Image (cartoon, rainbow, N blue to C red):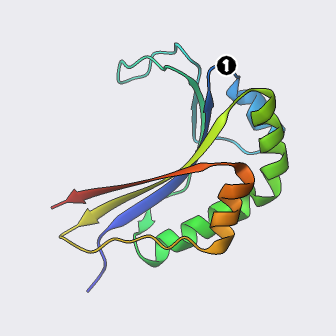
Amino acid sequence: MKYLSQAYVYLVIFGENFHPYELTNQVGIEPMDSGIKGEKRKSGAVLKECFWKYQLNKADALDGLEESLQKLVGIFNYKVTSLKDYMLRNDLKSKCCIVIKSQNGEDAGVVLNSDFINFLHKLNASIEIDVYSQT
């Protein structure tokens, strides 16, 4: 039986006042989304802070999620010093989000290996895990 639950992971840098394109230039990685405080989004919501977001594609919520976490570390591990410098200069925070969309009552769990935990620690990032049950 094929595992139907999907998951994705993203890293977001956020704060009161910074320009996402400056962060892009600093780390040399294009964000998947970004925004400036006060900007109105398609949904009609007005942003309460600036943000820069890098998201990986959806994968299955078993092996695919673990691979996505490893890929995220691989992309950003050598950029941690640049990210931390920029974040300190601009009083920014970072967060890694894991989103799981569970299908048909399938169990969904997350394994955080030591490389990923060390990456979060070096970046002083928090983690958010959201699980949505879909039928």
Which residue is at 65% across, 73% downward? Answer: 114
Residue occupied by mark 1: 17
Total numbered badges shown on the rendered structure = 1
Camera-nearest residue between 111 and 57: 111
Residue furthest bottom as drawn: 1
Which residue is at 63% across, 69% downward? Answer: 70
Q: For the C terminus, which image quadrant? A: bottom left
Disc 1 secondary structure class: loop
- Residue 31 location (% of width, % of height): 64, 41
- Place residue 131 in its image quadrant: bottom left
Left-right relation of 17 to 127: right
Camera-nearest residue between 83 and 8: 83
Image position of 53 with respect to 78: above or below: above
Q: For the N terminus, which image quadrant? A: bottom left
- Residue 34 location (% of width, % of height): 58, 31
Residue type highlighted by circle 1: Asn
Camera-nearest residue between 85 and 28: 85
Which residue is at 40% across, 70% downward? Answer: 61
